[in-house]
Structures are given as C-alpha cells and as structure tokens.
Amino acid sequence: MAVAIAATVGFVSCKPKDADVKTALEEKVKTAPELAGVTVSDVKDGEVTLTGELKDAAAVAKAEELLKDVKGVKHITNSLTVAAQVAPIAPIIVSGDDALSKAVTDAVKDFAGVTANVKNSVVTLSGSIAKTSLPKLMMTLQALHPKKVENKLTIK
C-alpha cells in the first residue's frame, strides 16, 4: 500500500503545474516574433486557450504548432483571430491642369463665344469676344495663376 501511495504521489508531483505551463508558454510567446499578438488566456489541467490577433491564417496555425510541444500541454483551444485586411488606397493624383481646367471652364462660361484649353498650366483662348468684355475675362483668368494666357480671340 505504501508503494502505491508513493508511486501515485511521485507520478502526480511530476506532472507540470498549470501555472508553470502558462509561464513556459508565455516565455515562448515573448521570444518568438511570429507569436507577437498571441495571449495565453487560460491553462487548466493542460488545456490551453490562446487568444489574440495575428496577420493571417497561416500565422494562426503556426502559433498553435509552435506552442503544442511545450511540456504539460495536452490540448490547445485556438481562439486566435485574423486581423482584418485593409486594401491600400491608391493615391489620387491630380495634376495642376485638372484644377486649373475646371476653374477656367467655370470662368469662361460667362463669356459667350469664348473657348479655353489648358495644357501645362497655359490657358489658350479662342473664339470671339466683345472689346469691353476682354479686360474682365483676362483679370478673371490671371487670378487663377496660370503660367501664361495665350489670347487667340477675335475682338468684336
């Protein structure tokens, strides 16, 4: 009987304590960069629960693989999640001509018979305009700060 008790006590005392298993798991998580984001939430009777968020499904599977060999781990409940993937937004490139073209189109609409073209920040005017309206049009266009205004208008 004494031998049976001694064997049982010896067997039970060799079994790692849950706190020791959790400490060993947490140390492994700290030292492995690929486990950044993993939390050892619970260890009870060798049953381990992992939580946290990793970059992809492969990282989630790898985390479980790396931790299952820790002494005292019987089973891992993997509650890790994959971080939401956000697609990068392509930058919108607006050339100076786009904004200038819009502003020039808006300025010219009040002058019947006048058309304008913008290229490389140079405004080229064509069509016809009354002599009295020309100064107002030119001041309006100069206020938009183009490189140059080429006047090819016919003056009436």
Image (cartoon, grey):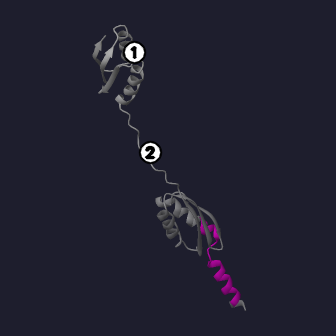
Bin the neighbour count of mark 2 within 10 Å (Cα to Cα): few under 14, some 14-19, many 20 and up: few
Image quarter of residue 89:
top left
The stretch in magenta equals 4-22
Q: Check the picture and name the quadrant holding the N terminus.
A: bottom right
Residue visible at 34% across and 22% down? 115
Q: Amino acid at mark 2?
A: Ile
Q: Is residue 69 above or below residue 81?
A: below
In the image, residue 144 lies at what x, y percent?
Answer: 38, 19
| Residue lying at the far bottom of the rendered structure | 1
Contact? badges 2 and 1 (CB < 8 Å): no
Residue visible at 61% across and 67% down? 49
Q: Nearer the viewer, residue 90 or 127?
A: 127
Q: Nearer the viewer, residue 118 or 95?
A: 118
Instruction: Reply yes or no: does residue 154 show up in magenta.
Output: no
> What label sits on residue 140 in the rendered view?
1
Q: Nearer the viewer, residue 68 or 134?
A: 134
Instruction: Reply yes or no: does residue 7 show up in magenta.
Output: yes
> What label sits on residue 89 in the rendered view?
2
Q: Amino acid at mark 1?
A: Thr
In the rendered view, does 83 fall on the left or right side of 8? left
In the rendered view, does 98 fall on the left or right side of 8? left
> What label sits on residue 79 in the rendered view?
none
Point out the frontmost of discs 2 and 1: 1
Majority secondary structure in the magenta region: helix
Bin the neighbour count of mark 1 within 10 Å (Cα to Cα): few under 14, some 14-19, many 20 and up: some
Q: Secondary structure at mark 1?
A: helix
| Residue lying at the far top of the rendered structure | 132
In the rendered view, does 95 fall on the left or right side of 89? left
Q: Check the picture and name the quadrant holding the C terminus.
A: top left
Q: Nearer the viewer, residue 44 or 118?
A: 118
Q: Secondary structure at mark 2?
A: loop
